[in-house]
Image: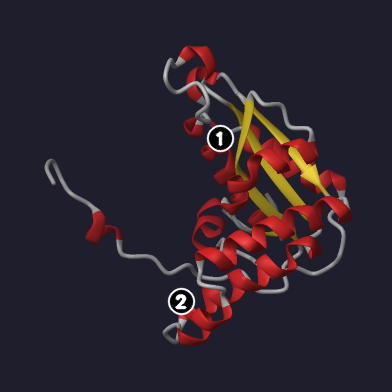
Amino acid sequence: MSSDVGLFEAMYTARAIRRFKPDPVPDALILEVIEAGTMAPSAANGQPWAFVVVRDADSKRFIQQRYAVTFHAAYASGRTQIDQAPSGSQARLMTAASYLADHLADVPVLLFCCVERYGARRPGREHEPRHDSIFPAVQNILLACRGLGLGACLTTLHALHETEIHERLGIPAAYASPAMIPIGFPRDRHGPIRRRPAAEVTHWERW
């Protein structure tokens, strides 16, 4: 991370960024954030992850077409719901999320965070992704992006079109892609994150 953004500052200010400048992101920065992801813990240190960097314009349009359909279906075609949403942070979040869905192809980098499925090691759950071994890496990547001055956010709606997207990107059937992270230089600013106080969600000894 850059020297002027400490660990706790990164955690407390890494807002989800959904609007990006068109400037390309250098390969070196992408590899740096992926390397940060690979420093995360994984079950039995199995490191069952792989990462696909998508910058091809046609592939990004292919992904956006499917992502946008799913987003607007999930949020009642977006615009009407956004217009009716309460004022404040929730309305801003919905507006930014809708913007991302409609402009995903313009994001400089779409990073697919892939992980092995359980396979034969978990009978009855063979096709499930090893979530415990990918989401720590995802969080490391988000924090690394913040530390390097990049914007990023966690998205998952693409997973509803996994078969088509995996075929397009050549992702093997033995892997799932539970997380996609749009990455670029932010148009919006990082800043303080609002969360419920820890005291409200903490139980000592017993719930």
Against 157, residue 107 (above or below) is below
The picture places residue 185, in percent across and down from the top left corner, at 76, 64
Residue 3 makes an appearance in the image: no
- Determine which of the numbered discs, if any, sits on residue 72 in the image: none
Residue drawn at x 70%, y 69% is 102
The color scheme shown is: secondary structure
Residue 9 visible in this rendered orientation of the protein: yes
Tags 1 and 2 touching, CB below 8 Å: no
Residue 30 in the image, given as x and y percentages of width and height = 78, 46
The answer to which image quadrant residue 186 occupies is: bottom right
Q: 177 left or right of 165?
A: left
Kindly identify the residue that appears in the image at 72 percent across and 37 percent down: 166
Instruction: Indicate the amino acid at tag 1.
Output: Ile
Vertical placement of residue 139 versus 129, above or below: below
Q: Which residue is mark 2?
A: 90
Marks 1/2: CA distance?
A: 28 Å
Q: Nearer the viewer, residue 110 or 36?
A: 110
Numbered tag placed on residue 134 in the rendering: 1
Q: Which quadrant of the figure has residue 101?
A: bottom right
Q: Secondary structure at mark 2?
A: helix
Type of amino acid at the residue the image marks with label 2 = Gln
- 112 or 46, which lies in front? 112
Q: Position of residue 18 (x, y in %)?
A: 65, 67
Q: Nearer the viewer, residue 186 or 128?
A: 128
- In the displayed structure, would residue 55 be above or below residue 35? below
Label 1's element? loop
At label 1, counting other C-alpha atoms closer than 10 Å, the crowd grade (few under 14, some 14-19, many 20 or more) is: many
The picture places residue 76, in percent across and down from the top left corner, at 51, 72
Residue drawn at point x = 73 percent, y = 60 percent: 65
Residue at 68% x, 56% y is 66
Query: Of label 1 and label 2, which has the lower sequence position?
Result: 2
